[in-house]
Image (spheres, coloured by chain):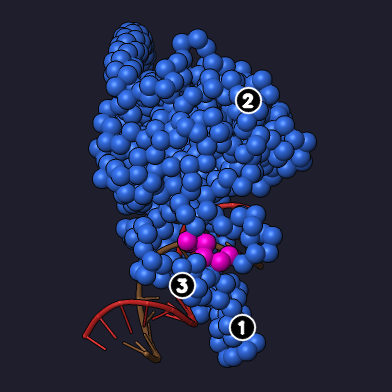
Chain colours: A blue, B red, C brown
DNA sequence: CTGGGGAAGGGGCCC
DNA sequence: AGGGCCCCTTCCCCA
């Protein structure tokens, strides 16, 4: 019996040893295979990256050739050596171009609050049917030729639409018939030629070139110049101390828009950056992406993605405020500058202190396609928002005529108030969409929601969403019925003070808007406009 | 009935 | 956050 037990134990121990050795062998085999597999994977990925780079280079080359060919066809003959800047967005941004169809596409270069007399402007007003207006701004080289002229036009050059900022009004003059103001005169001779009906390919090519270049620069500098407000000790709403004196374009972008490629590289991304407090979420369907976005995402297949998590932030509720701060090292212009590179764009001139500054609009212009009203709508429709939210309604579209307050931009970039001034509230952080300056990146983020269509604040009682918390709060009075403002002259109550103010005109008989044609006065600008359109239509 | 204008209500956005 | 201005739409009244 004892022998039997001993034998059994020996058998058991042998079995255990055998099992252990088998497991060890299996593990070894798995490890070896896994190592080989990983090696192969790495090699494949390396090959893929190499092929992608080649592809991008080829695309770049083709795009550049195409752009050059197109430029040659449309170049303005008067300045053969000038740098051409294709700027589609400016025209669209002001509600011009094809957005308003037939409106003049007279634009002022972004970030450029001055117009020079030596630059002819050619405005094609008769091409309202164009679906693609391209503003070619030239030339940068003329700036150096006559640097003093722009000082003469540093103010009072704003779009008459923005009468709020009109100095004449500020001086106390009633805003009489502001709608009657003639369309913006050709304020200078800046040579802006709108090329109507230019094929998209031309613009796409330009954008392609710029995007690639900008992306490469970001990649090269990201690790060194990444800005992390939290790491810098910034609070949620804190504004950073001014680390330098340059204007800093703030690069804010929803990373989800870049991460939806689904090509495997997205796995490397940190997608945990969503702000949980924000009910907003953006999903871009690659199939529905605007053309320009595809360009960006093409780049994202490569090295771009691995950096994107640090580049992007949702920015909802101002929690993160991550920005890319691009300093002068980042934006050094090298010799091989694409024709559209804004190395000498007006933006540079706006704060020239011998520093180089690149306009990232070219890169983001790919995403600017999102910001067109139609695509914004699509953008919203793609937005699942919160679980309580249904499909987006028709509200909330971005009105570009309001968005682009050129006077603000002028103030932001004015020599006295810009980077060269000693103002405490330097507006060093630029919106990359419209170049408007802000004093801290958080403000830029909030502002840029205007362009991106990001609306973080949703109403719990309806499907409305808002860019700003205050807007939501104000909106909720619609549901609550709260009307804290009462008219002292009558029983009427209002939910908003400005509505009460407007109402008070009923009692005061104030009619500040007068028609310059017939003298009829109106209490509202809208009424005057309608009146003039119907009775004195010159539009 | 229709069009013009007044008034109110609401959203967008900037300061 | 609140104030303020812009714009728009809608409703109503009246000639």
| Distance from the alpha carbon under mark 2 to that under mark 1 | 50 Å
User: If the image is split into quadrants, where does the C terminus of chain A sit?
Assistant: bottom left
Q: Position of residue A161 (x, y in %)?
A: 50, 55
Q: Which residue is mark 3?
A: A518
- Front-most of A118 and A269? A118
Position above or below: A311 against A23? below
- Residue A65 placement, left or right of A141: left
Q: Residue at x 45, y 16 (%)?
A: A81
- Label 3 crowd bin: few (<14), some (14–19), many (20+), radius 10 Å: few
| Number of the front mark, 2 or 3 | 3
Mark closest to the chain's N terminus, 2 or 3? 2
Q: Give the quarter of the image for residue A255.
A: top left
- Front-most of C9 and A366? C9
Q: Mark 1 vs mark 3: tell me if same chain.
A: yes
Mark closest to the chain's N terminus, 1 or 3? 1
- Front-most of A188 and A61? A188
Q: Which residue is mark 1?
A: A508
Q: Residue at x 42, y 22 (%)?
A: A78
Residues drawn in magenta: A175-180
Q: Is residue A226 visible?
A: no
- Chain holding disc 1: A
Dot 1 lies on which element?
helix
């Amino acid at each position: 019996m004892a022998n039997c037990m001993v034998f059994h134990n020996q058998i058991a121990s042998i079995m255990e040893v055998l099992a252990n050795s088998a497991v060890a062998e299996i593990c070894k085999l798995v490890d070896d295979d896994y190592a080989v597999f990983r090696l192969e994977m790495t090699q494949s990925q390396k090959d893929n990256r190499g092929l992608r780079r080649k592809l991008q280079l080829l695309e770049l080359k083709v795009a550049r050739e195409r752009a050059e060919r197109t430029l040659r066809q449309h170049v303005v003959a008067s300045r053969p050596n000038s740098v051409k800047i294709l700027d589609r967005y400016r025209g669209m941004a002001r509600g011009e171009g094809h957005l308003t169809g037939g409106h003049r596409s007279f634009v002022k270069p972004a970030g450029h609050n001055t117009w020079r007399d030596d630059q002819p402007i050619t405005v094609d007003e008769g091409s309202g049917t164009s679906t693609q207006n391209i503003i070619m701004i030239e030339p940068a080289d003329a700036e150096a030729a006559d640097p003093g002229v722009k000082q003469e036009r540093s103010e009072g050059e704003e779009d008459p639409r923005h009468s709020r900022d009109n100095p004449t009004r500020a001086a106390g003059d009633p805003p009489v018939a502001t709608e009657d103001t003639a369309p913006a005169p050709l304020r200078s001779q800046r040579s802006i030629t709108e090329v109507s009906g230019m094929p998209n390919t031309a613009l796409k090519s330009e954008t392609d070139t710029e995007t690639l270049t900008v992306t490469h620069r970001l990649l090269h500098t990201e690790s060194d110049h990444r800005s992390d407000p939290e790491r810098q000790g910034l609070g949620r709403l804190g504004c950073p101390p001014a680390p330098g004196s340059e204007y800093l374009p703030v690069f804010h972008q929803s990373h989800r828009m870049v991460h939806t490629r689904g090509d495997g590289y997205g796995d490397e991304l940190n997608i945990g950056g969503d702000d949980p407090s924000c009910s907003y979420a953006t999903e871009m369907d690659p199939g529905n992406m605007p053309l320009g976005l595809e360009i960006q995402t093409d780049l994202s297949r490569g090295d771009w993605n691995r950096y994107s998590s640090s580049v992007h932030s949702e920015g909802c509720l101002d929690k993160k405020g991550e920005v890319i701060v691009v300093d002068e090292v980042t934006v050094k212009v090298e010799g091989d500058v694409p024709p559209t590179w804004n190395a000498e764009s007006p933006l540079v001139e706006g704060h020239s202190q011998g520093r180089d500054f690149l306009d990232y609009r070219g890169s983001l212009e790919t995403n600017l396609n999102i910001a067109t009203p139609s695509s914004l709508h699509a953008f919203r429709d793609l937005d699942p928002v919160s679980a309580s939210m249904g499909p987006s309604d028709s509200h909330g579209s971005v009105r570009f005529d309001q968005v682009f307050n050129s006077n603000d931009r002028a103030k932001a970039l004015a020599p006295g108030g810009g980077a060269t001034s000693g103002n405490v509230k330097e507006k060093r952080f630029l919106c990359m969409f419209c170049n408007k300056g802000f004093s801290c990146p958080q403000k830029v983020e909030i502002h840029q929601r205007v362009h991106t269509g990001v609306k973080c604040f949703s109403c719990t009682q309806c499907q409305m969403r808002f860019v700003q918390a205050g807007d939501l709060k104000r909106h909720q009075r619609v549901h609550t019925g709260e009307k804290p403002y009462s008219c002292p002259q009558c029983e009427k109550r209002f939910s908003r003070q400005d509505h009460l103010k407007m109402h008070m005109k009923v009692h005061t008989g104030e009619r500040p808007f007068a028609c310059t044609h017939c003298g009829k006065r109106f209490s509202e600008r809208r009424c005057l406009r309608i009146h003039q359109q119907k009775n004195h239509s010159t539009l």
